[in-house]
Amino acid sequence: MTEIANQPTETAGPRPASRPGVTVPLPGPLHSHREWLAELADLGYTDVWSAESDGADGFTPLTLAAAWEPRLRLGTAIIPAYTRSPACLAQSVASLADAAPGRVAIGIGSSSNVIVERWNGLVFERPYQRVRDVVRFLRDALSGEKVARRYETFTVDGFRLGVRPEVAPPILIAALREGMLRLAGREGDGVIINWLSPEDVAQVVRVVDDAAGGEPREVVARIFCCPSEQTEIVRTAARFAIAAYLSVPVYAEFHRWLGRGEVLGPMWEAWASGDRKAALAAIPDEVVDALVVHGSPAACRARLAEYAANGVTTSSLMILPLDPALDVRQALRDLAPAAG
């Protein structure tokens, strides 16, 4: 679904305070993370945000964090709208919110055709409608009332949550282009964004602000970072991640919308032809430097501050060990709020 973005409203209110967060799970087995999580809170990080693709599920790392470190807010960024049935998803959301009242934020997104179709054997169709319907159903279910409703992409007949969390979690919507961004502004409590530069954030936020009609919305960004001054090593390794993500149709369309169609065209053409080596070589340094934060810790902190200056209110810092010599735990210390 395509919607046209207008200019931001003049009445946009103040945004939520900045929240520095980290993507989880951290390296190593989940049972080993208790001390890491405590150290994150000591360093001034406020949030941990889980992802769900081919590693740990989106809820288990947050459940452990709920029990181990009460100072951290827990968020999913994101849970796909397709891969759990509506009732099962509502139970998972309610259970986490019940375990950590007032400390949970739920991010829902369409994910991608690769994850939904190729990995889970489901049909990836009408993503806008599916995400919208899942968000509406979660709000209905978390009210505690019996849900008997025909949504556009599924029907729920007589479901009532047996767990009623003391505090209903905010629901954020992962969005790339205008339609989903406007949905996040209208029906979500915030938006989750991914694989974009600080300068791109302003373009995204304008759409959300306009759809929100002046109500402040949380803007969560997963930010990929490698604090290393081994520039060529980092750029070479980063090209693999960029090619893998930006060749997925939803991300390719996102970057066309952001204005990178011409500069990324050669990469997409080579990737489509099966020439992976040529695709990697076709990614310009300027694209790598725009999408992956790297350099000295001080340079990285300055670049991270640019995301906040352009409208990000909550970060989900993802340390990429693109330099084999990088110590991820030390990188989190070097980039922590307390280090600034």
Image (cartoon, grey):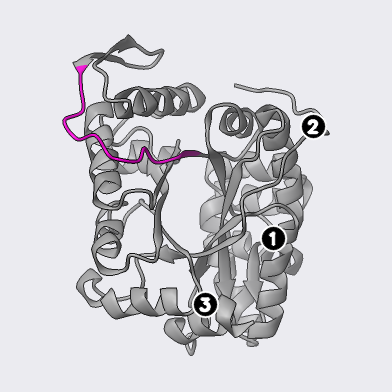
Q: Is residue 262 left or right of residue 181?
A: right
The residue sitting at 77% across, 45% down in the picture is 259
Q: Does the magenta stretch include residue 161?
A: yes
Q: How crowded is mark 2: few (under 14 residues within 10 Å), some or many (20 or more)?
A: some
* Amino acid residing under circle 1: Tyr
Tag 1 residue: 307
From the viewer's side, name the closer residue of 77 and 196: 77
Q: How crowded is mark 3: few (under 14 residues within 10 Å), some or many (20 or more)?
A: many
- Mark 1 secondary-structure assignment: helix
**Could you tell me which quadrant the C terminus lies in?**
bottom right
Q: Residues within 10 Å of mark 1 (few under 14, many from 20)?
A: many
Say whether residue 160 is visible: yes
- Mark 2 secondary-structure assignment: loop
Which label's residue is closer to the chain start, 2 or 1? Answer: 2
Residue 50 placed where, x, y %? 38, 56
Find the residue positioned furthest to the left. Answer: 162
